[in-house]
DNA sequence: AATTTGACGAAGC
DNA sequence: GGCTTCGCCAAAT
């Protein structure tokens, strides 16, 4: 298990209820700004084992990245249940729900 | 050891 | 706005 992988797991576990993070964000925070696809692989294979809040992870556009209709529905359901609104296309308002780690973001307003 | 694979992202058209 | 191309890199084959 690479340190990067471990970091990703920790970060995902740290996403608070009612917030979401993007793959790129997680990868960057884990120390690999271009490692979005590793995050994908990690979620794909480890979400169940680590009981991660995988449903709080969306792609850069704020949309649910899953492909299977059934799983997409499940994710939007979980998000709605936490207070995150999703539209018909399974998209969330990133400006509103994106989680910014306060330890790393000295000026959240400047990150947008 | 070498190659393929992705629930991605940014850039270009 | 959509679609294609390319880069990315750990993990699975």
Image (cartoon, coloured by chain):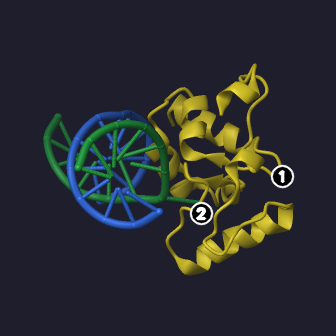
Chain colours: A yellow, B green, C blue
- The residue beneath circle 1 is A17
Q: Nearer the viewer, residue B3 or A32?
A: A32
Image coordinates of residue A4 in percent, x first then y, are 53, 32
The residue positioned 54% from the left and 36% from the top of the image is A27
The residue positioned 79% from the left and 60% from the top of the image is A84
Determine which of the numbered discs, if any, sits on residue A8 in the image: none
> Element at badge 2?
loop
Chain of the residue where label 1 is placed in the rendered structure: A
Which numbered disc flags the more N-terminal residue, 1 or 2? 1
Task: Assess disc 1: are there few (<14), some (14-19) or many (≥20) residues with their C-alpha within 10 Å of its C-alpha.
Answer: some
Task: Assess disc 2: are there few (<14), some (14-19) or many (≥20) residues with their C-alpha within 10 Å of its C-alpha.
Answer: many
Viewed as shown, does residue A56 lie left or right of A83? left
The residue positioned 73% from the left and 35% from the top of the image is A100
Image coordinates of residue A62 in percent, x first then y, are 61, 54
Quadrant for the C terminus of chain A, please. Answer: top right
Question: Is mark 1 in CB contact (under 8 Å) with mark 2?
Answer: no
Give the Cα distance between marks 1 and 2.
16 Å
- The residue beneath circle 2 is A64
The residue positioned 50% from the left and 33% from the top of the image is A2
> Element at badge 1?
loop
Up-down relation of residue A105 to residue A84 (above or below): above
Residue A73 in which image quadrant: bottom right
Could you confirm whether marks 1 and 2 are on the same chain? yes
Residue A26 in which image quadrant: top right
Up-down relation of residue C3 to residue A11 (above or below): below
Up-down relation of residue B4 to residue A109 (above or below): below
Image coordinates of residue C5 in percent, x first then y, are 21, 50
Residue at the limit of the structure toward the bottom, as seen here: A70
């Amino acid at each position: 298990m690479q340190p990067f992988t471990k970091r990703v797991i920790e970060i995902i576990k740290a996403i608070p209820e009612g917030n979401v993070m993007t793959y790129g964000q997680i990868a960057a925070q884990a120390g690999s700004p271009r490692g979005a696809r590793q995050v994908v692989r990690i979620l794909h294979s480890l979400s169940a084992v680590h009981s991660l809040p995988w449903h709080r992870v969306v792609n850069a556009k704020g949309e649910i990245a899953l492909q299977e209709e059934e799983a997409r529905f499940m994710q939007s359901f979980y998000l709605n249940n936490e207070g995150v609104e999703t539209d018909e296309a399974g998209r969330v308002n990133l400006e509103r729900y994106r989680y910014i780690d306060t330890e790393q973001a000295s000026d959240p307003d400047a990150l947008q």
